[in-house]
Amino acid sequence: MHLLGYSWGAILAQEYACKYQQHLKGLVISGFAASAKSYEERMQYVRTTLPAKAQQIFHDLEARNEVGNQLWQDTMATYVFPQYFFKLSEWPEPLKRTMEHLNGPLCVYFNGKNDFVIDGAMKNWDRWNDLPNITVPTLVIAGEQDLLSQDDANTMAALLLQGFVHIVPGASHVPFYENQQDYFQALLKFLASVK
């Protein structure tokens, strides 16, 4: 079978491939790097690109130990999401529904409350050294301003035995909505190439 993992699913797809790749025909890793540390480094970079006002809000909330509160979430929605999560002004209904039903306590358990620091259960998750052991054809796909950086996407593809990379122009973390034609053209081309 082909296995596509997107965002959190990209972590699960990498885990599956490391243990059960004999069941895979092809693998697609979309929107997440090969370690929690890499994701944290990307989020730390994202933070430096924000307006000074947003950076100050995050700094002040951290200093008061009020990370993750409503002001924090509102600041993420105002400054981070439009640039790095979803660039289009109108959110499609399936994406709205996903966000409405997001399991907050589970996200906090794995990630922690601070969007820029991974201190939850997955903080030590790392598969960089295992990527060369994945031998099936693998497409690493990311938006141009994704939470998976272009550098990490390129490094992942280089480490994989049959790794390919595609960066979706004009897109961030939800490239299959932001630039559907490019995302699915790359995806379908990869799937057709895997015999």
Image: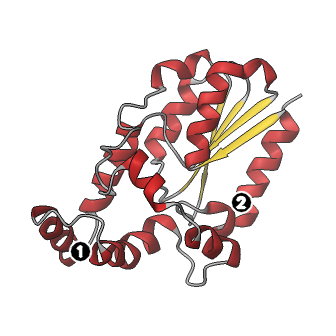
Task: Residue under label 1, please give it.
Answer: 54
Residue 128 pos. (x, y %): 46, 25
> Can residue 122 be seen from the camera position used here?
yes
Find residue 20 and name its label. none
Residue 87 pos. (x, y %): 53, 73
157 relative to 162 in the view: left or right: left
138 relative to 188 in the view: left or right: left
With respect to residue 188, does 35 lie above or below?
Answer: above
With respect to residue 44, does 95 lie above or below?
Answer: below
- The amino acid type found where label 1 is placed reads Ala
Residue 102 pos. (x, y %): 55, 64
- The amino acid type found where label 2 is placed reads Asp
Mark 2 neighbour class, 10 Å CA radius: few under 14, some 14 to 19, many 20 or more: some
Find numbered disc 1 in the image and state the secondary structure of the residue it sits on.
helix
Between 128 and 94, the one nearer to me in the picture? 94
Residue 97 falls in image quadrant: bottom right
Q: Residue at x 56, y 70 (%)?
A: 99
Total label count?
Answer: 2
Task: Residue under label 2, please give it.
Answer: 182
View extreme (bottom): residue:
90
Between 171 and 102, the one nearer to me in the picture? 102
Q: Residue at x 60, y 84 (%)?
A: 90
Q: Residue at x 45, y 54 (%)?
A: 107
Find numbered disc 2 in the image and state the secondary structure of the residue it sits on.
helix
Q: What is the image's colouring?
A: secondary structure
Q: Earlier in the sequence, mark 1 or mark 2?
A: 1
View extreme (left): residue:
63
